[in-house]
Amino acid sequence: MQTNQQWLKLISVCLGAAALVGCTTTSPTPNQRAQITVTPFGPPQNGIAVDRYTLRNKNGVEAAICNYGGLVISFKVPNRWGGFGDVVLGYDNLADYIKDSPYFGAMIGRYGNRIAKGKFTLDGKEYTLAVNNGPNALHGGLKGFDKVVWEPKILARSEGPSLQLRYTSKDGEEGYPGNLSVTAVYTLTDDNALKLEYTATTDKDTVINLTQHSYFNLAGKGDILNHTVMIPADKFTPVDSTLIPTGELKPVDGTPFDFRTSTPIGARIGQDDEQLKFGGGYDHNWVINKPMGKLGLMARVFEPTSGRVLEVLSTEPGLQFYTGNFLDGKLKGKGGWVYQKRNAFCMEPQHYPDSPNQPNFPSVVLKPGQVYKNTIIFKLSVRR
Ligand code: GLA
């Protein structure tokens, strides 16, 4: 039950945000009004309220974000007939996210993806991280950015409803050097794109690789094998059996990793291919054909029954495409859906895995005085 105080908070944020995001003066009907509503999502953590911020644009598209983990907890978008449906996996409450989540919808840091044996050397000094994935470090450690509470602030942006999240990771946290101050801004634009803009600064040389770990199913049910995927990449980074890149940039030509023309996920996923076996499906980094740091298309995914299209754009050089290979029917998510293998896919724009140990990969070093920037966009549309 909502308390009076909570209702007051909700209403005032709605009105405040509607004004802030500059609703048109042509009196849109209430359901066309861009706005943010705030409702409690769980008990406060470390003295900070944990809320669900529902960003709604003028088309009625809604993205709900939680300031715990920067989670995208739902993303409701139309199908080709205009029917709205949630296209991301997750849970109904905070307790389930805290108990056991394979990074559903989460912001990932300090280092998204794997670092071999949880060790790297920077400026001649060796750093040791928690090993939390076989012999390797994964997704920022035991308490990565997916498990911290972020300081929320609703922003006034003309592009659409916008939520800023800030967190300062202390020097030595999870074994990484430097006090790292991170700002993440989610904006839901009127062209139905959920944009995430990261900036970060450090006071000591460090490594950084932030990403977003939403699990998509554009049909909102079933497996994702009929979704078609296009990834504009001539090369990918093959891995060893623990999913650490070998260092090679391998041409996709003639392999099941060639998604340069749109291909159903299921078309080749079961092929007798060593790389697919190591990943249990696709769980690899593609080297996107675009200049470093330039915002560009990383992937286009189409689901034929709903007509929904997801375009992923980013400034990052690589894309981890993961096909939910570790989902195994043990987790019960929103609306009682028991998540099975291949019920979702992730598109994680990032630097290549294990970059701190791979001198030939683009650098992930951030130095004092530099500003780390990374933009990730999930844009939804329909094909009729
Ligand atoms: C990433 C990894 C996968 C897996 C998931 C979470 O996508 O590459 O191997 O760990 O996160 O389950």
Image (cartoon, rainbow, N blue to C red):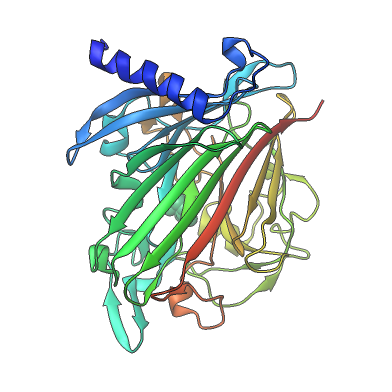
Residue 103 at least partly seen: no
Residue in front for this viewpoint, 282 or 288: 288
The C terminus lies in quadrant: top right
Name the residue furthest left: 47
Residue 342 relative to residue 384: left or right: left
Q: How many marks?
A: 0
Residue in front for this viewpoint, 84 or 259: 84
Tell me if residue 91 comes above or below residue 270 in the rendering: above
Tell me if residue 128 comes above or below residue 53 in the rendering: below
Residue 125 at least partly seen: yes
Q: Position of residue 113 (x, y in %)?
A: 45, 60
Residue 364 relative to residue 347: left or right: left
Residue in front for this viewpoint, 321 or 186: 186
Residue in front for this viewpoint, 15 or 36: 15
Residue at 53% from the left image edge and 65% from the top image edge = 351
Name the residue furthest front: 25
Name the residue furthest bottom: 124
Residue at 25% from the left image edge and 68% from the top image edge = 175
The N terminus lies in quadrant: top left
Residue at 78% from the left image edge and 47% from the top image edge = 262
Q: Position of residue 236 (x, y in %)?
A: 65, 66
Figure quadrant of residue 49? top left
Q: Position of residue 354 (x, y in %)?
A: 46, 71
Q: Position of residue 86 (x, y in %)?
A: 55, 25
Tell me if residue 197 comes above or below residue 118 in the rendering: above
Residue 16 relative to residue 292: left or right: left
Figure quadrant of residue 27? top right
Tell me if residue 307 comes above or below residue 231 in the rendering: above
Residue 264 relative to residue 384: left or right: left
Figure quadrant of residue 293? bottom right
